[in-house]
Amino acid sequence: MHPLGESRLVDVGGRRLHLRIAGAGGTTVVFEAGLGMSGVCWGLVAPLLADDARTVVYDRAGIAASDDGPSPRTLPALAQDLKALLGTLPGPFVLVGHSWGGPIVRLAAPLASALILVDPSDERDDDFFTPATAKRMAVAGPLTRAAAGIGIYRFAARMGSALPPDLHAQFRAENFGRRAARALHAEIRHFLPGLAFLRADPPDLSGLPVTIISGSFDAAHAASAAALPHGRHVVAAGAGHNVMLDDPGLVASEIRRAL
């Protein structure tokens, strides 16, 4: 059995998204990965919850075993795919999103009973709205595709070295080839417009418990949590951006708290 559970392909309107489901319980915890990443990045967290809840990790359109999705891959389009996926699963749902996955699960909040945002991309961080960031983001996708084309992008897979060897091999195969680079490019070109969209019209999270776990962006995250009636800010001391790999126990404990 795969550590993340049974593999399934789910129809979301004429195309399929791949997921893995494991565990049992009255609540389904659905994990949303960051930009261009497959669900295997949750390989240290989801298995810790097998006795507490049903866990679902999935691959967004164009990533790993999921079919390609229609263009453009805007933030609302990614969230719509998540909502369609949730429609095939039993609730209630706790939604967990890392990095760009944080804004995605926020747009699906009406379907959730709680949100756990793991070092999420946060529109309160003014650094995202500078000319320098715009320039970096404009070249990030093309550079990633070029690196994948000549085979050097795979060296970035060392970020997942905390995963067990079999999952790290899957992590490398799914996330650092040419198709993965295309998917990342398709998503990253709408990253800054997506944050601007949230800044102009943030989703209403006032009725939900929302936990924000920071590995970076601490000030923006603290402000976002403080602005919510049921917001909670947790700092992952010593962790980097990939908190789910650096401190999986903390992420799992916050999910249990939400459960």
Image: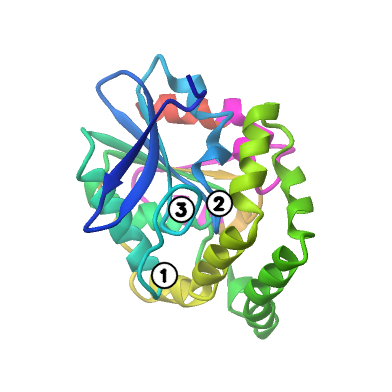
Q: Which residues are magenta?
A: 221-250
State the image quarter where residue 203 is shown: bottom left
* Labels 1, 3: front one: 1
Which residue is depicted at the point 65% across and 28% down? 166
- Mark pair 2, 3: CA separation: 13 Å
Q: Is residue 246 left or right of residue 112?
A: right
Label 3: how many Cα within 10 Å (few below 14, some 14–19, many 20+): many
Marking on residue 73: 1
Which residue is depicted at the point 58% across and 58% down? 180
Q: Nearer the viewer, residue 13 or 88?
A: 13
Residue 213 position within the rendered picture, expressed as x and y whole percent measured from the top left: 55, 42
- Amino acid type at image mark 3: Gly
**Residue, far top:** 51
Marking on residue 37: 2
In this picture, is 181 found above or below 155?
A: below
Q: Earlier in the sequence, mark 1 or mark 2?
A: 2
Disc 3, SS? helix
* Labels 2, 3: front one: 2
